[in-house]
Image (cartoon, grey):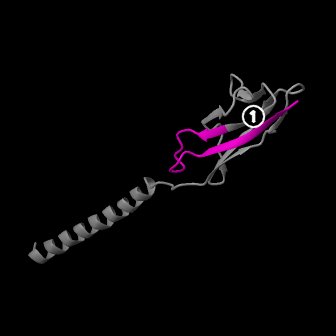
């Protein structure tokens, strides 16, 4: 074997390794890349006006979308600004009216990996006689 043949084969092997490493690097960067921040919306689709004496408990329907996709059973934190007016039931799936007035229900998406801040919505509720 001559020195020229060995040099050519070595160059070809190195070039092949560089091409493979570049291709693998690009594929891995795509596989582990973040999908990016997404717009998150929290919508309350329940009635926000309640009658204290005829229907003091209403089911709470909340729809959360991230990047246009509806999230199924998202982890939410709910709290009332005034529990003497409205309060969540034990399961957290209904709002119970306690007295006439107005209160806000604050809804936050826990552990959000879609945005850099915690998506939160504050929804007003009115309890009437």
In this view, 69 is above or below 12: above
Give the crowd class for mark 1: few <14, some 14-19, many >=20 residues within 10 Å: some
Taking the spot 79% from the left edge, 26% from the top edge, the residue there is 99
Count of picture labels: 1
Q: Residue 79: which quarter of the image?
A: top right
Please state if 33 lies on the left or on the right of 77 as rendered: left
Q: Which residues are magenta?
A: 106-129
Please state if 109 lies on the left or on the right of 5 as rendered: right
In this view, 20 is above or below 45: below
Query: Is residue 65 located in the magenta-colored stretch of the structure?
Result: no
The local secondary structure at tag 1 comes to: loop
Residue, far top: 90
**Picture coordinates of residue 66 (x, y %)?**
62, 50
**Picture coordinates of residue 46 (x, y %)?**
79, 39
**Picture coordinates of residue 119 (x, y %)?**
59, 46
Query: Is residue 107 located in the magenta-colored stretch of the structure?
Result: yes
Q: Residue 47: which quarter of the image?
A: top right
Taking the spot 69% from the left edge, 31% from the top edge, the residue there is 82
Q: Quadrant of the C terminus?
A: top right
Q: Nearer the viewer, residue 116 or 37?
A: 116
Which residue is tagged 1?
60
**Picture coordinates of residue 16 (x, y %)?**
28, 67
């Amino acid at each position: 074997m001559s020195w020229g043949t060995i040099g050519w084969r070595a160059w070809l092997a190195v070039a092949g390794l560089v091409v493979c490493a570049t291709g693998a690097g690009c594929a891995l960067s795509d596989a582990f890349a973040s999908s990016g921040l997404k717009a998150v919306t929290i919508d309350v689709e329940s009635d926000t006006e309640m009658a204290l004496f005829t229907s003091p408990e209403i089911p709470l329907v909340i729809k959360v979308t991230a990047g246009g996709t509806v999230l199924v059973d998202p982890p939410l934190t709910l709290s009332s600004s005034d529990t003497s007016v409205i309060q969540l039931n034990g399961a957290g799936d209904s709002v119970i009216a306690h007295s006439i007035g107005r209160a806000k229900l604050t809804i936050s998406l826990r552990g959000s990996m879609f945005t850099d801040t915690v998506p939160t919505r504050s929804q007003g509720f009115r309890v009437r006689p």
